[in-house]
Image (tube, rainbow, N blue to C red):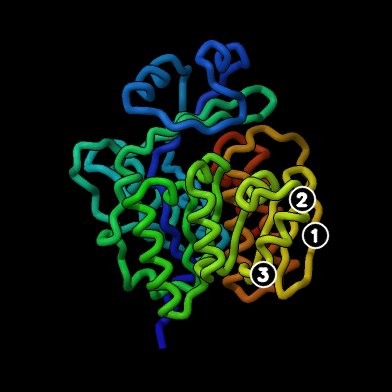
Amino acid sequence: MTSRTLDIVAIGDAIVDVISTCDDAFLEQHRLPKGSMQLLTPEQADALYNAMGSARETSGGSAANTMAGVAAMGGRAAFIGQTANDQLGKIFAHDIRALGVQFDTPPADNGLPTGRCLILVTPDAQRTMNTCPGASHTLAPQALDEALIRSAQIVMLEGYLFGPEQPRRALYKAVEIAHAAGSQVAFTVSDSVVLDGRRQSLMAMIEQGGIDLLFANEDEAMVLTDAADLDGAIARLQPNIATLVITQGAAGALAVEGGKRTDVPAVQVQKVIDTTGAGDLFAAGFLAARAKGHGIDRQLLTGGIAAAEVIGHFGARPVADLAELVKL
């Protein structure tokens, strides 16, 4: 029997978040659709970075944010992702390890820089994400630490890696390793842009039993299934997903597990400052509670508490004592 020394290991983009504030006029000037996520070339990233105001740099990436949240709640977390042997790569590694997340993926030397995400936050707390994936989208199957994957109760896959071919092959391999070891596979869609040209491939993976737990928001679920409404999306996904989790922003979240639907309201916050990382921290709370053996209601509630904490301040990482807030 495989020894479970970890609660969760995540595989995703190893990127550095560069977070700055701006007004709507700045977004319009640079033709950036508000609240969207777009991919940039290194040259485009340099130009936008030079135009931005003062910024804060932290290790980022959707799944990495989730693992930071899991560690903050007392969970045993590890992360697999590709950096480069450069300054941003060193920042990423130092920062995520300092948060208590195991990270041992060797840096690549393929000429591409460590990925970065330039996040622009407007006064209404909307974040516009501009990502230059760099080395993170070169994660190869042979870079996976198979023993690490086998040691986790849950293996979480980040949707942003499902687009490019090489990291997608790494995700397929991770599914095989995890299921052979009896681990659960969780997948977070991450963003509707992930589904461009890959919707059928992801649905095939779901229908073949590759995913045990799926995180998506309402829009992502409907785009993924080509459904006209949320109920239609749930009906399409439910037969092939043991645990389906749909986040609904201010309306809360729901889960369908064992044929039963559970809805929870959003946890209220005094003021929404920055929505960066809300979905990532929701997944962190949900998975941390799941790894501890709590039921679906508690998993959803813990996700809501973690998401509420992160949207109440600037940045995608918790600043309050999450372990004390959630009391797992």
Q: Which residue is mark 1?
A: 263
Relative to 227, 69 lies left or right: left
Q: Position of residue 240 (x, y in %)?
A: 62, 69
Q: Amino acid at mark 2?
A: Gly
Asked if the residues shown at circle 1 and circle 2 are in contact, with their CB atoms under 8 angstroms apart, the answer is yes
Disc 1/disc 2 C-alpha distance (Å) = 8 Å
Name which of mark 1 and mark 2 comes first in the sequence. 2
Label 3 element class? helix
Residue under label 3, please give it. 239
Per the image, the residue denoted by label 2 is: 252
For marks 2 and 3, the one nearer the N-term is: 3
Name the amino acid type tagged 3: Pro
N-terminal-most mark, 3 or 1: 3
Find residue 83 and report its horizontal and vertical position in percent.
30, 45
The structure residue drawn at horizontal position 53% and vertical position 39%, both measured from the top left corner, is 193
Circle nearer the viewer, 2 or 3: 3
- Give coordinates of residue 60: x percent, y percent: 45, 43
The kind of residue tagged 1 is Asp
Q: Residues within 10 Å of mark 1 (few under 14, many from 20)?
A: some
